[in-house]
């Protein structure tokens, strides 16, 4: 289902050409990015729950979505998505720790079916929170610098075209 949803979103983006993008198209595409990243976070959380929960090696995939949000969206939106992803992860980890959510321990994915230890749960939350925060800060900073450089290049090209027209 997630693959089909993302395929539809990708197809929609491909059909809407960027060179002639109007403000309405741009807003639609941003909304689609918000929706896609949010839906991906929800599916990722369910997948991680089925693949060992807090002990799952797949928790690192939250960072991929934080990176994508940081590149494609504004810094404010990227931080909001990082908070959403972290909140979903925290709900999963804390839910397992307090036994509000049953643990799934697939053989070969997680090496122990013991109850989730509180120290491990807190370590996962601190490490993932730190990594998500650091990632969104670094990538939004880099994306800002790239956008700034692109703006400067466009301005320089405009000036060069004016000079060329004057000659």
Image: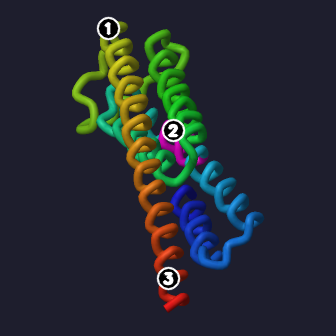
Q: Earlier in the sequence, mark 3 or mark 2?
A: 2
Residue 115 seen in render: no
Q: Is residue 114 left or right of residue 6?
A: left
Q: Main secondary structure of the magenta part?
A: helix
Closest to the camera, between mark 1 and mark 2, is 1
Q: Is residue 87 left or right of residue 129?
A: right
Residue 37 seen in render: yes
Q: Nearer the viewer, residue 119 or 162?
A: 162
Whether label 3 touches label 1, CB < 8 Å: no
User: Tag 2, which secondary structure?
Assistant: helix
Q: Residue at x 41, y 32 (%)?
A: 132
Q: Can you identify the residue that label 2 sits on?
A: 46
User: Tag 3, which secondary structure?
Assistant: helix
Q: Residue at x 58, y 34 (%)?
A: 80
Q: Nearer the viewer, residue 2 or 129?
A: 129
Residue 26: % across, % down:
68, 63
Q: Which mark is residue 163?
A: 3
Asked if the magenta segment contains residue 120, the reply would be: no
Q: Residue at x 63, y 49 (%)?
A: 34
Q: Earlier in the sequence, mark 1 or mark 2?
A: 2
Q: Can you identify the residue that label 1 sits on?
A: 119
Q: Residue at x 36, y 7 (%)?
A: 118
**Alpha carbon distance from label 3 to label 2:** 58 Å
In magenta, the rendered stretch is 39-45
**Alpha carbon distance from label 1 to label 2:** 23 Å
| Relative vertical location of residue 125 with respect to residue 17 in this rendering, above or below | above
């Amino acid at each position: 289902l997630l693959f089909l949803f993302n395929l539809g979103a990708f197809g929609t983006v491909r059909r809407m050409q960027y060179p002639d993008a109007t403000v309405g198209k741009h807003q639609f595409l941003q909304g689609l990015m918000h929706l896609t990243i949010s839906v991906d976070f929800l599916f990722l959380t369910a997948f991680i729950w089925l693949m060992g929960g807090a002990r799952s090696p797949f928790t690192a995939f939250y960072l991929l979505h934080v990176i994508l949000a940081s590149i494609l969206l504004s810094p404010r939106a990227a931080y909001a998505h990082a908070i959403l992803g972290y909140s979903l992860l925290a709900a999963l980890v804390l839910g397992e720790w307090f036994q509000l959510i049953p643990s799934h321990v697939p053989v070969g994915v997680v090496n122990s079916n013991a109850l989730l230890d509180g120290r491990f749960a807190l370590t996962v939350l601190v490490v993932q929170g730190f990594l998500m925060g650091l990632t969104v800060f670094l990538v939004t900073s880099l994306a800002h610098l790239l956008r700034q450089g692109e703006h400067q290049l466009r301005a320089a090209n405009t000036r060069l075209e004016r000079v060329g027209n004057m000659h």
